[in-house]
Amino acid sequence: MPDFEVRSARVGEGVYVVSVTGETDLHTAPDLERELQGVLVHGGTAVAVDLSHVDFIDSTTLSLLLRFQPRFRAREGDLVIVSEDRRVLRTLEITGLDRIFRIERRLADAVSELLSRVQAAGAAGTV
């Protein structure tokens, strides 16, 4: 697995993808936190956190994602996790977080769902 890297991209009105590569742990969580905070500062209402290139996730990162999810939901959006790595999915399952987060195996599915949700919320006048 390559060194840790995190980056974000706006993919639609208020919708962002935060892509993470490498292991996410106590040492890398502050970088992920800064990226998620940046999405909020730039008006993001929904985010897909792409963990497709992550093979290890620790409790620090899980806690961080849990802290940010309500911030996006308060904006009528969501924080969706993307992964198909069995180790990451198993960690989410063991901790019960698979029942709290929406988890998609494909980034395209997560982005499509978030774009639809934000568009529907905008049409309803709630964003």
Image (cartoon, grey):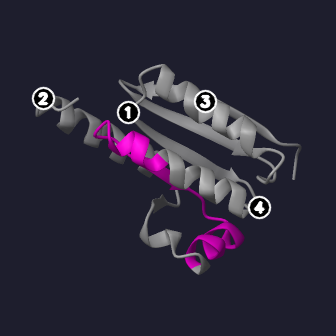
Q: Is residue 70 magenta?
A: yes
Q: Is residue 9 visible?
A: no
Are circles 4 and 1 on residues that touch, CB within 8 Å?
A: no
Which residue is disc 1 drawn over? Answer: 45
- Mark 4, residue position: 55
The residue under label 3 is 8
Q: Residue at left 38%, top 33%? A: 45
Which amino acid does the dot numbered 2 rest on? Gly
Q: Are marks 1 and 2 in contact (CB under 8 Å)?
A: no
Question: Mark 1 to mark 2: distance in Å?
Answer: 14 Å
- Which residue is labeled 2 in the image? 125
Count neighbours of disc 3 (C-alpha within 10 A) and say few if under 14, some if 14 to 19, many if 20 or more.
some
Tell me if mark 2 has few (under 14), some (14-19) or many (20+) residues whose alpha carbon lies within 10 angstroms of its own.
few
First along the sequence among labels 1 and 3: 3
* Local SS, label 3: strand
- Give the residue at x 73% y 45%: 29
The stretch in magenta equals 69-93
Residue 99's label in the rendered image is: none
From what the image shows, is residue 95 above or below residue 48? below
Mark 3 vs 2: CB contact within 8 A:
no
Where's residue 49, x and y in %? 56, 46
Q: How far apart are marks 3 and 4 (CA)?
A: 19 Å
Residue 39 horizontal/vertical position (percent):
52, 28
